[in-house]
Image (spheres, rainbow, N blue to C red):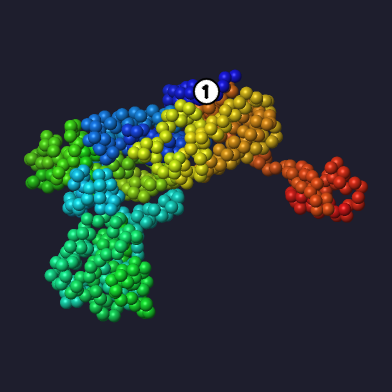
Amino acid sequence: MKEYDHKKIEKKWQDIWEKKGIYRAQDKSKKPKFYGLIEFPYPSGAGMHVGHIRSNTAMDIIVRKRRMESFNVLYPIGWDAFGLPTENYAIKTGIAPSKVTKQNTDIFRKQLKAIGFSFDWSREIDTTDPKYYKWTQWIFLQFLKNGLAYKAKMTINWCPKDKIGLANEEVVGGVCERCGMQVEKREKEQWMLAITKYADRLDKDLDEVDYLPQIKLAQRNWIGKSDGTEIDFKIKGHDSVIKVFTTRPDTIFGATYLVLAPEHEMVQKLKSQITNWSEEVEKYVKEVKNKTDIERTNEDKVKTGIELKGIKAINPANKEGIPVWVADYVLPHYGTGAIMAVPADDERDREFAEKFKLPIIKDYKKAGFEDFGKRITKFKLRDWVFSRQRYWGEPIPVVFCDKCGTIPVPEKDLPVELPKVKNYQPTDSGESPLANISKWVNTKCPKCKGKAKRETDTMPNWAGSSWYYLRYVDTKNKKEFADKKNLKYWTPVDWYNGGNEHTTLHLLYSRFWHKFLFDLKLVPTGEPYKKRTSHGMILADDGTKFSKSKGNGVNPEDVVKNYGADSLRLYEMFMGPFDQAVSWNRDGMVGPRRFLERVWKISQKLSKNSSLSVLKLLNKTIKKVGEDIDAMRFNTAISSMMVLVNEMDKEEVGVKDYKKFLQILAPFAPHITEELWNMLGEKKTVHLSLWPKVDESLLEDKEIKIVVQINGKVRTEIMINVDESEEEIKKQVISNDIVLKFTNGGEVKKVIYVKNRLINIVL
């Protein structure tokens, strides 16, 4: 019989599966449905490294088992392809982003197919395809129509060298992480989405879904719901009040000063009364403007602040005047942008008070909030800054008309396609590169037919990924983003797995879009995903992240070539617990490969029937593997199959039982199992065969090994039938040849039996 040759086997079956379309989901089926989802990849020029495929492999194992359990499975794939990396590459090389995207998706597609994932490739999507982003633009227009999309002036981080706006995370120590240039703050009109209107539902509805506890916690921390009290502090000699939000109104008697965010409106309003305005305060306020929120709230940073001299606030609890400060650690958009400081009870307030020699009242009476304020709920969540001054993104479908104002592009004119350009460089003004294309910018107003200009900002790449799972259910639809019947059948997603890094913003944004579409009666459920899990990262062999700049990525194509896709899949799942980070070790590939070679060799020594020990262990393994897949304990599932193969190596294995083993191994190693299944005379694919049932009668051990002691010393071990009575077991032990040898005719005084563990014979 031929040797195990993964190169021939894997390509052969990948071609057959694709030709027969065995992984295609059926939109109309009497079977129960199962929708398994992974985060669709961002296709970079470097292709995938082995860390990218952990999530795909895990969900592939789950959906393969579901197919064998008679579910109609949807396991789709696509490309999240708009965004800055591709645009930067285009600027660097002069190759159009659309061409770069095609090259990259071709590489990724080839790699994914080589690993044998059971994606329904007929539903492949690409966020940069106008046929797809037409519907992203359409959804934006619904936000606009319903008052949830609006324009507002925002302060952004601006890199004068790269001429781009930066997210807070892209600013490190006040400089651009890309080029090291000092970052400036600029005022810019930005499109916003009013996600805050959904804050309470986004928090509350987490109770309705099956998400890992740490995922729910990440969501709730970002939403930041706080029940507290808003208290008015009057300004001495002024009509205005400073509103303070606190979750501890009972500590008001211990409040010895107020702290405002430097951007707080009262700072400017009171500047004529601030005696140190020009010497200290104005300079401090300007300095703070160039710091990011992350820098300002870093717990390790040195505390800074300036007293607003000449200003006193009145503590409403004791009517005493207290000083007012500005400090960078208070942010304008958290709470009310003002805090009452209680240094006796708050560590940060105490550190600040000690540094600036402010009073600390250690013994003060507690109060109830009914006396000084009103009960309200606040959220940390801010509205979503939705526009980007980039080229490679979905054009925002509005025009500006001097006569009619901001006008949405009519739905019949969607998509508003990106024009082809030669220059992707950002502009000096901070506008998108699209602003330089006058032929595209200048247009007619859809309302009055007069002169108008297009919006030149584009959407963030969060936009296309906020609803992609809905398009998968009906990718070819030209009349709507998805057919209502398909949406009713397939959604919500039954199980969504992805990286830990995407369990906050991406998840929050897609939940927000879904709830908005639900309110418009465009989707049938209030939540997009029933179940959300995440996996730990695969790190380089030195414990660091894989990165292009370090050149430490491991190309899965090389691993597949040398060891086979099935070995790679097994190794990725066997490395360690799925929810934990693990380091890649090429030497670790040897074990899974040898395991598969042993599986292959066992197929050459099959008998008519299996030994009892193989039968029992097989049933236990079927049960364990099934349970472990559903609990994402992939490493222990593989370990139990390795134990079974060890037993099969030593004992007789029947064809029928070997086939059952191939069925439970099939989701992990789809190619070798399909080949062996076929070699054993099966004409239909193993991947659509029925998951083997557990024979409960074989799970219980009828015979067990117990220890035999004589006068307290262990002399032997014997097998007993657990169904036998205690008296029968004692008789069996006493008459055992080895036991007779040690008792040597001595008088047996007592026989002590500890059930299913030991017998002690006292002479």
* Residue in front for this viewpoint, 694 or 541: 541
Left or right: 444 with respect to 139?
left
Please tell me which residue is depicted at 30% across the width and 36% down the height of the picture: 81
Amino acid marked by disc 1 = Asp
In the picture as drawn, the residue positioned furthest to the top comes out as 1
Please tell me which residue is depicted at 40% across the width and 37% down the height of the picture: 552
* Residue in front for this viewpoint, 639 or 594: 594
Residue 491 seen in this snapshot: yes
Left or right: 662 with respect to 518?
right
Q: Tell me the crowding category of disc 1: few under 14, some 14 to 19, or many 20 or more residues within 10 angstroms, Cα based.
A: few
**Numbered label tally:** 1
- Splitting the image into 4 quarters, where does residue 275 fall? bottom left
Question: What residue does disc 1 label?
Answer: 5
Q: Is residue 272 above or below residue 669?
A: below
Residue 61 seen in this snapshot: no
- Secondary-structure class at tag 1: loop
In the rendered image, residue 322, in percent from the top left (x then y), is placed at 25, 76
- Splitting the image into 4 quarters, where does residue 341 fall? bottom left
In the rendered image, residue 113, in percent from the top left (x then y), is placed at 42, 29
